[in-house]
Image: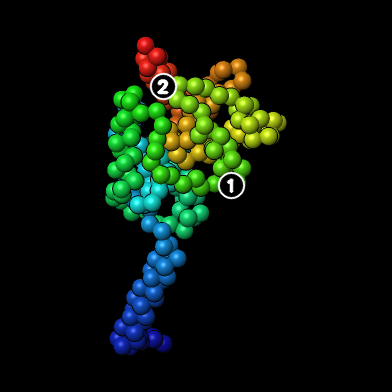
Amino acid sequence: MKLRVSPRFSISVLSALCFLTVLLTSWYNILMDKILLEFWYDTPLGRMLSLSDDGALYLLEFEHRKFLDREIERLKKRLSAKIEYGETNISKQLARELDGYFQGKLEVFTVPFELVGTEFQKLVWQEVLKIPSGERWTYKAIAEKINKPQASFAVGAANGANQLALIVPCHRLVRTDGELAGYAGGLDKKRWLLNHESEFKNERKI
């Protein structure tokens, strides 16, 4: 026996599905009340991605950073945010400061930013922020400064989770023997950044 579906029934089901879609979209927009705007910058080391709103910068990373997609999804979840493309006052300020940094005219970024992570990660990042341009500190030194002298590896892991490249200068951390260790953007970029900062530090002394 063949079942016949009334056209009215089909239309009713379709209308209900459309209504449900609109309702779910509205709920999603309410829950995801923070909107971060994505913007890209061209630098001597390749493109960099920023995520910001008009209040703060939340992410600045090199395009080919390891697991960048995973990092963005984690940030979205923590902030209950969705991402759209566009500029903010923060991204415009960052563009000017990135130009100054790569031209060797700017040592300290002043763009407002937000640290998003665990309490331990934030503790490490606050210390990393204190490393002056042109200097190199060790993971062990940071561990000692936060009163956890045996936590060098944990410091390294927190450093690797930094989402604000250049702003939180994780590239200025090296091993106890002075050798370069992991950098999510690539050791070639870390070496370039350290040489760049040392070069302009020496020029300022002349």
Horizontal side of 151 relative to 138 (left or right) equals right
Task: Report the front residue among 191 and 116.
Answer: 116
Q: Mark 2 points at which residue?
A: 197
Along the viewing direction, whichever of 111 and 84 lies nearer the viewer: 111
The image position of residue 158, as x and y in percent, is 57, 38
Q: How is colour applied across the structure in the image?
A: rainbow
Q: Which residue shows up at 35% across the image and 37% down it?
A: 48
Identify whether 101 is placed above or below 195: below
**Residue 83: x percent and y percent?**
37, 54
In this rendering, does residue 137 appear at all?
Answer: yes
Against 201, is 23 above or below? below
Q: What element carries label 1?
A: loop
Task: Name the residue: 54% across, 46% down.
Answer: 117
Image quarter (top left, top right, bottom left or bottom right) of the C terminus: top left
Mark 2 is on which residue type? Answer: Glu
Which amino acid, by three-letter code, is at mark 1? Thr
Any mark on residue 39, and which? Answer: none
Q: Is residue 196 left or right of residue 155?
A: left
Q: Tell me the residue that label 1 is attached to.
A: 118
Classify 10 Å Cα crowding around label 2: few (below 14), some (14-19), many (20 and above). many
Q: Tell me if residue 115 comes above or below residue 152 in the rendering.
A: below
Instruction: Report the residue at 60% width, 17% height from top.
Output: 177
Q: Is residue 55 above or below residue 23?
A: above
